[in-house]
Amino acid sequence: MITIPALDLTAIKHALLIDLTINGTVYRISNAYGPITYNGNVYTQLGNFLSISEIQNDLKVTNNQLSVVLSGIPPDDGSPNYMNIALNSNLKGSNIKIYRAFFDVSSGFYVANQVYLRFNGYVSNYGLSENWDQDNKISSNNITILCNSVFGLMEKQFSGRRTNDVDEQRFYPGDTGMSRVKALADSQFDFGKPYSAPATTTSAEVTSGEMP
């Protein structure tokens, strides 16, 4: 069990730190008032990070999902352009980790040893939205990232294998046990019906030229 001393205080100050790994590149953002350095990595303050949904706390493993909203407007401070990243990268399946960092109430600085992992999962989907302010002629873009826990992804996996020749050759090359599955796919079988042998042609009928 993890003990968090900051939670025993009468006043709490905290911020969220996010690691978003896309195509091998890690983007680090936070909702703090200034840049935060944790484990030698700098987390960009505010800027693109707009909001995050509530993180659920469960005693058992559950399929938790949360959403992270990022600004799609290109920043002027040299920060990553997340709109271009979303449009030109394979965002689905990217790993995302969310930490909660606690601050010293009296000094206002965050405590380096008071950072805890709150969520570890993967991007399951994302959406792009555009809002147009007709009065001010201003357009704003948002990127909503839907994240699932590892348990949620496991629930979506398919177990077993398909009963066709393609899968059969994949697992057992050269085996013909499933070679006729495709030809028999639309056939009807009367299971339980007594077997009746088909009529056979006698040699006398063939000699006389009669049709069988």
Image: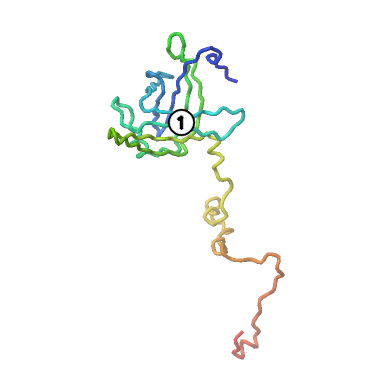
Q: Quadrant of residue 208?
A: bottom right
Left or right relative to 9: residue 29: left
Q: Which residue is mark 1?
A: 96
| Image x and y of residue 160, in percent | 59, 47
Camera-side residue of 181 and 26: 26
Which residue sits at x=46%, y=36%?
Answer: 146
| Image x and y of residue 17, in percent | 44, 23
Q: Quadrant of the N terminus?
A: top right
| Image x and y of residue 28, in percent | 40, 26
The kind of residue on which mark 1 rests is: Ile
Camera-side residue of 67 and 85: 67
Left or right relative to 101: residue 180: right
Query: How many badges with numbers are in the image?
Result: 1
Left or right relative to 149: residue 32: left
Q: Quadrant of the C terminus?
A: bottom right
Which residue sits at x=44%, y=31%?
Answer: 68
Q: Residues within 10 Å of mark 1 (few under 14, many from 20)?
A: many
Residue most toward the bottom? 208
Tell me the colour scheme of the image. Answer: rainbow
Left or right relative to 49: residue 54: right
| Image x and y of residue 7, in percent | 54, 16
**Secondary structure beneath disc 1?**
strand
The correct choice, above or below, for 119 with respect to 153 in the image is above
Which residue sits at x=64%, y=82%?
Answer: 201
Residue most toward the front? 135
Q: Quadrant of residue 197?
A: bottom right
Residue most toward the top? 106
